[in-house]
Each structure stands twice: as C-alpha cells, then as structure tokens.
Image: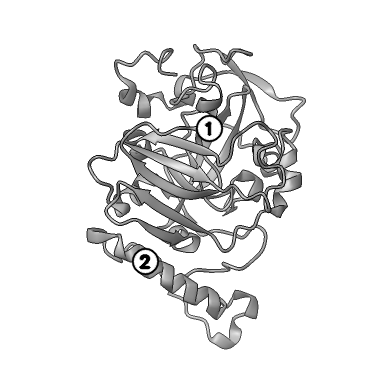
Amino acid sequence: MLIRSSSNIPSSEITPKSTYDAYRRDRRSFLAGLGAMGAAAMLPAVAHADTPGLTRLKTVSSNYKLSETTTPESKAQSYNNYYEFGTDKGDPSRNAHTMHVRPWAVQVEGLVAKPQTIGIDTLINYRPLEDRTYRFRCVEAWSMVIPWNGYPLSEFIKAMNPLPSAKYIQFISLADKAQMPLLGESGINPPYSEGLRMDEAMNPLTLLTFGSYGETLANQQGAPIRVIVPWKYGFKSPKAIVKIRFVKDMPPTTWNDLDAQEYGFYSNVNPNYDNARWSQAHERRLDSASSLFAKTVPTLMFNGYQDQVQGMYAGMDLRKNY
C-alpha cells in the first residue's frame, strides 16, 4: 500500500473534521445492524463528501457488461424522466440543481430487526462499488445503455436483517417543495413510492446505485442514491431515496396508483404487452448524443435479462400481472 506524507497531500484531498465525525457516527449506526457480517466488509474512509457536483468513484470491475454501444454520458444526463423537476425530457438537467444531496440519510423502517437511519457516505462505503453496464428501458419506448456504479441491493437487505414476515420492500423518494419547486405540478402525488417483491429485490441484478460513468449520480439521475432494476421499465427504479420500508403486503406505488392499466406493479419489460397509447414491441436506442437519429430495435423480453429473472415469474400470466 502506498502511503504519502501528509505534507504532499493537497488540502483539497483532506476530509474535513466535521465530515469525518459525521461518518464515524453513521458508521457506528450501520455496524450495529450488520450482525454476523461484521465490520470487515466496511471500507475505512469517506472521501470528498462535501465536494459539490460530480466526483469520481472508486469502482471494481464486474461481469455485468454488454457488448452494445454505451450511451454518451451527456445524453444520459440530459434526457431524463424526473417529474419533480418537470415533464419535458430536458427539464431535469435544467432544474435539478436546486436539490441538495449533502447531508443525506436513509431511514430503514418496518419489518426489520433494527430500524435505523444511515448516512449516505456510510452506504456508499459499505462495500466496493461495481461498474455494471445495463440496458435501461423506459415505458415511452426509448432505451439507453448506461454504466451504473453500485452494489447488489441484496447485500444491503441481508445486513438489515428483515423479519421473515417481510415479503416486499418499499422505497420512498425525497419530496421537498423548497428543493423541488415543481413538486406535485405534473399530476404525480408526492412522495414518489415504488416497491419490489422480496425475491426481485434480492436478485443479483438489482443494484443499489450511487453513480454512473464512474462518477457520483447527477441530481437529474436520482442522486445521491437510487435503485436500478434493469429488467423492468425505468419508473420501477426509484430515485433520491430517503426511506426504505420492509413490509408484509404489496405496497402502494405511484404510477400503479395513478393508472394501473398502463403501469402495473410488476412492469417487467414485455414486448407482448402494449401501453394503452403506444406499442412496446420496439424501442429507440439512444446510443449517440442526438435523439433524431436513434435507431429502432426490437424490444427484448425482460429487457434481455430473461435467463436471469424469468424463474421468478414461473406460472404467472405476465399480461394479467403486468
């Protein structure tokens, strides 16, 4: 291990005492819930927690890669759905600067051994972040290929030790009018709520996500913490999470409550089930900086992840259980 003299370290790389103290408090809280997993998996330091804007993340290589062309980072950060900041695809990148992602904490509630509140930097440093390239498919028939940075949600769930009665997990997003001036103006009732069946949440593909393209998430991408569920439509991957609840029954979810015919609880990518307003059989792959010349490709069942996830839905009618 390379150790540098403190005299050679730029002041910009030295963690402020207030940040380090906050990290120590959060780390003790999280360690208390780890049980048999112990402290060995925890990384020892938090870096640049007070740096504004995007910062580089330390990531490790992953087997979750695609041979398809990666969407340019500029497109992934400028073409987004995030109704708390506007309904036009370009609105989030223009408006999301009003949200503050530090300090940030996530409350863990419900059917869990020890309800607790965990700071964002403790979550980020719980284990090495993997660099995973996933297809990301939206219900409006467009898709991207994005390198996401995070670790399996299952690792977090196991550390929280949910009770056997917990069959679902619910995610609640930030709803703060002061930071989100357009909150509630799109017809979406805040706060945004999403949920997964427990086996879906535990699937190795489901990613607790803190970054993309090797950097911390941009605000318009759901900073500082979101979930990516790559075989489902994009609205099933909640952003800016502030609460995680373990529950017995299927939780209410925002789009399903708004229009259950179009936005089912499961919402697996399915070319055989059309949205009421458009076909889902094809999609526009945004693999360049321009949306005008996006190529149209056939939509893959489960977004191409059929081998990894179809067993969870054996015997289910995926048109009825959409």
Residue shown at the point (41%, 13%) measured from the top left:
320
Q: Is residue 67 visible?
A: no
Q: Report which residue position mark 1 lands on.
A: 254
x then y, percent, for residue 205? 41, 38
Picture quadrant where residue 207 is located: top left
Residue at image coords 58%, 24%: 139
Image quadrant where one finds the C terminus: top left
Residue with the most extreme bottom position? 7
For mark 1, does the 10 Å Cα neighbourhood hold few (<14), some (14 to 19), or many (20 or more) residues?
A: many
Of residues 73 and 36, the one drawn nearer to the viewer in this rendering: 36
Under mark 1, the amino acid is Thr
The secondary element bearing badge 1 is classed as helix
Q: Which of the two labelled residues, at mark 2 and mark 1, occupies the earlier sequence position? A: 2
Residue at 56%, 25% (x, y): give it: 258
The residue singled out by tag 2 in the image is 29
Specify whether residue 230 is in view: yes
Residue drawn at x 66%, y 63% as measured from the top left: 52
Please state which amino acid type lies under the numbered disc 2. Ser
Q: Crowdedness of circle 2 by 10 Å Cα count: few (<14), some, many (20+)?
A: some
